[in-house]
């Protein structure tokens, strides 16, 4: 991948309507479930970012037939539950933790051996969280030290059904267990301490699996050792194994995690008015919208409807005066990927925004807590990094128009959301912000710069570094 430094120059109000790329989480799942269904599936609105293209390639390597039509519709001819074939080559999952972890679940209960790798960011991310529970199916894993990729999975022909209580709310781990349960006889059960995104559950039902999800009854949690001490929002998900999944047609909603970037830019530029059609508003993904509304953001959800069980709406976002708040910790799973861009909104708000319960941010595509804190500080934003918290004091009351200072050069550490967050910061700041590498944005949001510029942003390739310098390093203005 060519390193692509990008600069965002300060812009005025944003306006217009833009179609955002498809939801990344749903796109991975749509390809994976189509690949183990019987008969053809047609997927429209699939995210064509690098992460999802890696999933498509890996599934081709496992024997599924996957084609993209000239009409932009993806057609998949699946191999049926348990029907994936041993791949001839290494599966390269690129930058995607979701693709790697979900696919390990699917492969654990297949009688095959596969080797999986990824880019430098993915090779540094922990896999024990799926390897450990999946080993109880009877699958075997051979990994590098500290459970990192590359690793080999030796799936089992006779998988045992799992009953697993997640130590932390993680949709990736939950989904890996459920996918392993597909080609396993009996009932697979996952207990989650608090609800995480339920795209796998919704889509499994759409493809014809028998799956149910219920809040755990306090009486039951007394009697059952595995449920002892669960909180009031804990849920259990039960999947009946070896279903016959049938190929389906589905439309992928626009990604709320991608919508977050134009949304924050529009909210923080007075006079903005932006319309984002058909964005997923699954309640377990909507924490950022709720938080920005509590901060005073004018976001309305128009024309609410449903795409294959997933709620969607057109989002209208208008420039607003934001006020810092304390984000309720129980909301974290519903906005886990949105904290970098929320920190940017907080930098333009009045007062202080406190974000707690963010330990998981340290093991995302980068250590997002540390990387955000460093980048914000380089852009003149008052920020405090705690072990699992971030506190940002905004420029709202301090500068004309509430613009944070900006002017920093930020290192993105192969993290698409860090790159986009700081390009939003440069757009709403007083001085331009440069990120050392915008190439990872292609993993989730192809065409990000053009789309933002159509709304009125000014994101461009960074000017060449002066001769004899090595280009952007993390520096303040
Ligand atoms: C995802 C789940 C989340 C999220 C990731 C996508 C998914 O990860 O951060 O970007 O599609 O299941 P965790 O499950 O690790 O919280």
Image: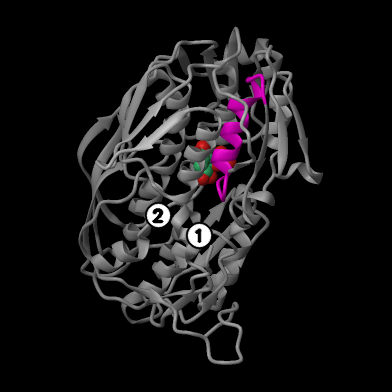
> In the visual, does 145 lie left or right of 26?
right
Disc 1 and disc 2 in contact, CB within 8 angstroms: no
User: Residue 380's spot in the image, x, y percent?
Assistant: 51, 79
Residue at the spot of label 1: 440
Q: Residue furthest front?
A: 88
On screen, residue 134 above or below 245: below
Residue at the spot of label 2: 445
User: Residue 101's spot in the image, x, y percent?
Assistant: 60, 36
Q: Residue furthest top?
A: 186
Q: Give the range drawn in magenta.
A: 93-112
Q: Residues within 10 Å of mark 1 (few under 14, many from 20)?
A: many
Q: Which of 434 and 99 is in front in this view?
A: 99
Asked if the magenta segment contains residue 96, the reply would be yes
Asked if the magenta segment contains residue 307, the reply would be no
- Helix, strand or loop under label 1: helix
Label located before the other in sequence (1 or 2): 1
């Amino acid at each position: 991948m060519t390193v692509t430094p990008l600069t965002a120059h300060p812009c005025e109000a944003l306006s217009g309507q833009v179609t955002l790329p498809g939801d990344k989480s749903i796109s991975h799942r749509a390809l994976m479930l189509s690949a183990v269904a019987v008969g053809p599936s047609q997927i429209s609105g699939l995210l064509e970012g690098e992460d999802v293209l890696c999933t498509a390639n890996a599934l081709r390597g496992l024997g599924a037939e996957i084609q993209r039509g000239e009409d932009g519709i993806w057609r998949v001819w699946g191999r049926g539950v348990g029907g994936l074939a041993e791949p001839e080559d290494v599966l390269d999952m690129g930058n995607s933790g979701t693709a790697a972890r979900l696919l390990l679940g699917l492969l654990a209960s297949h009688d095959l051996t596969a080797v999986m790798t990824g880019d430098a960011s993915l090779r540094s991310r922990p896999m024990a969280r799926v390897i450990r529970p999946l080993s109880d199916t009877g699958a075997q894993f051979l990994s590098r030290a500290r459970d990192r990729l590359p690793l080999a999975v030796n799936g089992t022909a006779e998988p045992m059904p799992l009953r697993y209580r997640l130590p932390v709310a993680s949709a990736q781990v939950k989904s890996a267990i459920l996918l392993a349960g597909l080609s396993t006889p009996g009932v697979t059960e996952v207990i989650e301490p608090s609800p995480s995104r339920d795209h796998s559950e919704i889509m499994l039902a759409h493809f014809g699996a028998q799956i149910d999800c219920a809040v755990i009854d306090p009486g039951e949690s007394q009697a059952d050792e595995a449920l002892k001490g669960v909180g009031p929002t804990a849920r259990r998900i039960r999947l009946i194994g070896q279903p016959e999944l049938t190929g389906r047609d589905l439309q992928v909603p626009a990604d709320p995690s991608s919508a977050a970037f134009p949304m924050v830019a529009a909210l923080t530029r007075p006079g903005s008015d932006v319309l984002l059609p058909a964005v997923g508003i699954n309640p377990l993904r909507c924490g950022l919208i709720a938080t920005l509304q509590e901060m005073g953001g004018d976001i309305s959800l128009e024309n609410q409807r449903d795409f294959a069980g997933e709620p969607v709406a057109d989002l209208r976002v208008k420039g607003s005066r934001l006020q810092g708040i304390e984000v309720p910790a129980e909301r974290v799973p519903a906005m886990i990927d949105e904290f970098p861009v929320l920190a940017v909104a907080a930098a333009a708000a009045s007062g202080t925004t406190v974000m707690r319960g963010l330990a998981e941010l340290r093991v995302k595509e980068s250590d997002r807590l540390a990387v955000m804190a460093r980048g914000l500080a380089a852009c003149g934003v008052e920020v405090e990094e705690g072990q699992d918290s971030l506190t940002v004091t905004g420029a709202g009351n301090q500068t004309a128009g509430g613009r944070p200072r900006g002017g920093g050069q930020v290192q993105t550490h192969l993290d698409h959301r860090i790159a986009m967050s700081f390009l939003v910061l440069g757009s709403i700041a007083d001085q331009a912000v440069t990120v050392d590498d915008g190439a990872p944005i292609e993993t989730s949001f192809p065409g990000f710069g053009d789309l933002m510029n159509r709304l009125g942003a000014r994101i461009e390739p960074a000017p060449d570094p002066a001769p004899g310098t090595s280009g952007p390093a993390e520096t303040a203005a």
